[in-house]
């Protein structure tokens, strides 16, 4: 038995935290109360004074790189990085090599995760065979094998007919379709947001229109065929506005953004630091403002990391040649707390919705709340703790993170998965 | 006399004082260059390596001669642009050159920011001899030197830059440098070759070449690459010349004392007519001479830095 006492509980259900204790036994929350009156030598006590406990964070968009790119990350290092970031359930994307486009590959990821992983891994499979954008995968079998969603993340499904078929076919299985929305022709060979900064730095731009055209098409498909859709990594004001309008018209749409889209702008590309190279690219201060508004008014349902680890050899090169992506598990919570909760944009309870309850409910997996009887997936954080990000301390193999050296507030201290403490103050147990 | 900076990466990060110092030093160097005996010991014992990932005749030769006139050991490495994506990385190549004792590495690279990457990782001074679409600071410095020499000042003059502004590192460096020194800049070119929000630099974007040239003291043409047509950015070179080509009729609109510049190499009859290139107002050949003087000045100022420090 584990007892966490004298802690502020944000349970994912009530709007305000309350003080009390949580008793965990056999992987479940067995009791939540005000004052603990049983004492036994068999109980491990965690002193929660000054700390907060949240439902375990859920990341519906990350890249674990296994199989195929184990030099960037693997399921073992990636899941360790996830627990260090406070995540208890994660959904890795399918753009591995080979991609997760059949039942066998889904089983591979699940079994690797059971063997070497330290968090719950719910795989996403591809929308199209071989990520080629031509033929839809055997979505029924992927669903039976345990995939919780489908996405060709990294590449949009360019052909609108293929996307339509995927949306209709997945609806039979309640399989979530996650769209990486982009107009590929308009991306051309852009490497950063198109605007004043790309002009100043002489780098080819990726206009906001690239994302907005992609999102608009997906909304129109979802609306006309009445099929649910989830839009990945929204980064622009126009994207937020399109989704807000679609929700207003009751289109069955959900969406996510990533911490870097409300924490950094294209001005960070100054100096050609390749750790700022990510797709969609870092946008302008106005877009950051719009992302925050979208999170506040509920247009944006989820904060997902889009954890995209790369090897240093893929970043320590010319900006044009460097890989797109940010290794984000281990800074996600602190960035969200520092830039959203501390700034008064979201309450802690709403942040928990965006990082735990909402993704759990969109993926239809357990988690997202703390109540008696629920699975004991929880994260304990110290909201007063300030620290300086040091990528050398990352559990991820990917040290590519533009927030290295920045001071952030709010630190994950413990991660508890199925009632077991798997991460405690910097150590994986 | 010395620059505090280790590297010359762009004019955007040079102060007015630093630009003045470079141009003043270049005056001395031009005097040396005009002598019968061009040898000076300013760079004796120094090693200068040019590392070019793109073809270049005048820029590389200009650096090489500048080094040799001042007694430095000069060597060059040419790498075809295909090796940018395969084989040795830029950093490995740069470190190798430094390990052989180079004091200054002059780099030209098809990708913006490549000199910045190198500068961060080696102790040798880096001079940017053109990086992608970003900057070509030594070209802009020689342009500014030429303007100052011909017109007596930069502050308050009007400069028109005509052509493919989007892909032009010469345009960017000139905008930063000339704006800092107090010039007013007018830009004209096809909208598809005009980078977004360029007006935020303070340059004025004109809708026609006539509007840009009207009353200016300097007309600067830029080379139009034929591949822009293949990329679909302009429908044809013929139409480009029709709309934006600099000819005698258009030059008539400029100030009577206008000077005509071009970073070279020129596509005669495309961005500029031969009539304009070869007219008395053209200073295109003097730009080349001044290029050697400016590069002598930069090499001297950068290598002095070590002695001073």
Image (cartoon, coloured by chain):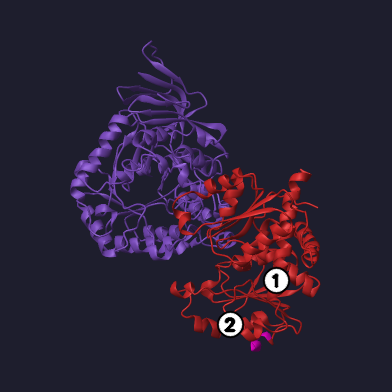
Chain colours: A purple, B red
Image spot of residue B163 (x, y percent): 58, 75
x%, y% of residue A248?
38, 59
**Tag 1 residue:** B287
In the figure, is residue B128 to the left or right of A347?
right
What's drawn in magenta, residue-wise?
B247-251
Out of A190 and A194, give the one closest to the viewer. Answer: A190
Mark 1 surroundings: few (<14), some (14-19) or many (≥20) residues within 10 A = many
Chain of the residue under label 2? B
**Quadrant in the picture for the N terminus of chain A:** top left
Work out which residue is located at the far front of the displayed protein and give it: B37
Q: Position of residue A258 (x, y in %)?
A: 45, 47
**Residue at the spot x=53%, y=81% of the render?**
B240
Q: Quadrant of the C terminus of chain A?
A: top left
| Numbered tag placed on residue B245 in the rendering | 2
Q: Nearer the viewer, residue B306 or A393?
A: B306
Q: CA distance from mark 1 to mark 2?
A: 21 Å
Are the residues flagged by discs 1 and 2 from a single subunit?
yes
| Marks 1 and 2, the one that precedes in the sequence | 2
- State the image coordinates of residue A157 (x, y, percent, origin top left): 31, 59
Quarter holding residue B11: bottom right
- Which chain is indicated by disc 1? B
Tell me where residue B123 sits by quadrant: top right
* Number of numbered callouts drawn: 2
Q: Nearer the viewer, residue A381 or B21?
A: B21
The residue at 45%/46% (across/down) is A314
Q: Is residue A104 left or right of residue B12?
A: left
Which structural element holds mark 1? helix
- The chief SS type of the magenta part is helix
């Amino acid at each position: 038995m584990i007892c966490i006492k004298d802690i502020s509980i944000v349970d994912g259900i009530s709007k305000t935290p309350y003080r009390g204790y949580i008793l965990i036994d056999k992987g479940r929350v067995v009791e939540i109360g005000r004052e603990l009156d049983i004492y036994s030598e068999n109980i491990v006590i965690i002193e929660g004074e000054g700390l907060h406990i949240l439902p375990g964070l859920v990341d519906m968009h990350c890249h674990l790189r296994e199989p195929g790119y184990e030099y960037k990350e693997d399921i073992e290092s990636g899941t360790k990085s996830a627990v260090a970031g406070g995540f208890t359930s994660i959904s890795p994307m399918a753009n591995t090599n080979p991609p997760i486009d059949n039942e066998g590959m889904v089983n591979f990821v699940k079994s690797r995760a059971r063997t070497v992983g330290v968090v719950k891994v719910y795989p996403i499979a591809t929308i199209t065979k071989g990520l080629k954008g031509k033929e839809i995968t055997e979505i029924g079998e992927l669903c039976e094998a345990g995939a919780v969603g489908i996405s060709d993340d990294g590449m949009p499904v360019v052909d609108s007919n293929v996307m339509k078929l995927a949306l209709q076919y997945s609806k039979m299985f309640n399989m979530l379709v996650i769209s990486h929305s982009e107009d590929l022709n308009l991306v051309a060979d852009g490497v950063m947001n198109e605007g004043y900064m790309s002009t100043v730095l002489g780098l080819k731009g990726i206009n906001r229109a690239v994302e907005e055209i992609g999102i608009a098409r997906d909304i129109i498909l979802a609306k006309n065929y009445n099929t649910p859709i989830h839009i990945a990594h929204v980064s622009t004001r126009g994207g937020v506005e399109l989704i807000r309008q679609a929700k207003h018209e009751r289109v069955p749409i959900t969406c996510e953004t990533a911490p870097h889209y409300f924490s950094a702008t294209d001005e960070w590309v100054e100096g050609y630091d390749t750790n700022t190279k990510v797709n969609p690219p870092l946008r302008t201060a106005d877009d950051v403002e719009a992302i925050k508004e979208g999170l506040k008014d509920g247009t944006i349902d989820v904060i997902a990391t889009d954890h995209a680890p790369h090897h240093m050899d893929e970043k320590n090169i010319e900006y044009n040649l460097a890989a797109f992506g940010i290794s984000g598990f281990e800074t996600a919570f602190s960035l969200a707390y520092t830039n959203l909760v501390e700034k008064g944009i979201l309450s802690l309870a709403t942040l928990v919705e965006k990082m735990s309850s909402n993704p759990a409910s969109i993926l239809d997996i357990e988690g997202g709340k703390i109540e008696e009887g629920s699975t004991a997936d929880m994260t304990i954080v110290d909201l007063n703790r300030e620290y300086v990000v040091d990528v050398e301390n990352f559990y991820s193999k990917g040290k590519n993170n533009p927030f290295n050296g920045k001071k952030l507030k709010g630190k994950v201290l413990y991660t508890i998965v199925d009632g077991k403490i798997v991460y405690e103050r910097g150590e994986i147990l | 006399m010395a620059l505090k900076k280790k590297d010359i990466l762009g004019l955007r990060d040079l102060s007015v004082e630093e630009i003045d110092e470079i141009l003043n030093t270049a005056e001395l160097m031009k005097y040396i260059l005009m002598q019968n005996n061009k040898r000076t010991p300013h760079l004796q014992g120094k090693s200068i390596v040019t590392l070019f990932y793109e073809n270049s005749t005048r820029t590389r030769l200009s650096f090489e001669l500048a080094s040799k006139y001042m007694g430095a050991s000069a060597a060059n490495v040419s790498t075809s642009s295909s090796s940018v994506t395969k084989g040795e990385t830029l950093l490995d190549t740069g470190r190798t050159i430094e390990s052989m004792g180079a004091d200054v590495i002059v780099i030209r690279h098809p990708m913006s920011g490549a000199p910045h990457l190198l500068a961060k990782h080696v102790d040798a001074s880096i001079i940017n001899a053109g990086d992608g679409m970003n900057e070509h600071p030594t070209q802009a410095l020689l342009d500014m030197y030429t303007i100052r020499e011909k017109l007596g000042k930069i502050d308050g003059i009007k400069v028109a830059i005509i052509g493919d502004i989007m892909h032009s590192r010469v345009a960017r460096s000139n905008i930063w440098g000339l704006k800092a020194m107090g010039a007013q800049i007018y830009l004209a070119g096809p909208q598809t070759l005009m980078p977004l929000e360029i007006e935020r630099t303070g340059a004025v974007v004109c809708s026609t070449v006539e509007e840009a040239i009207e009353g200016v003291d300097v007309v600067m043409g830029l080379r139009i690459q034929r591949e822009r047509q293949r990329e679909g950015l302009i429908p044809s070179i013929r139409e480009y010349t029709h709309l934006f080509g600099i000819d005698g009729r258009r030059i008539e609109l400029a100030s009577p004392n206008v000077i005509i510049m071009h970073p070279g190499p020129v596509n005669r009859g495309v961005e500029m007519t031969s009539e304009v290139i070869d007219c008395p107002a053209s200073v295109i050949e003097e730009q080349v001479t001044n290029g050697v003087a400016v590069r002598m000045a930069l090499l001297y100022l950068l290598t002095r830095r070590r002695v001073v420090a």
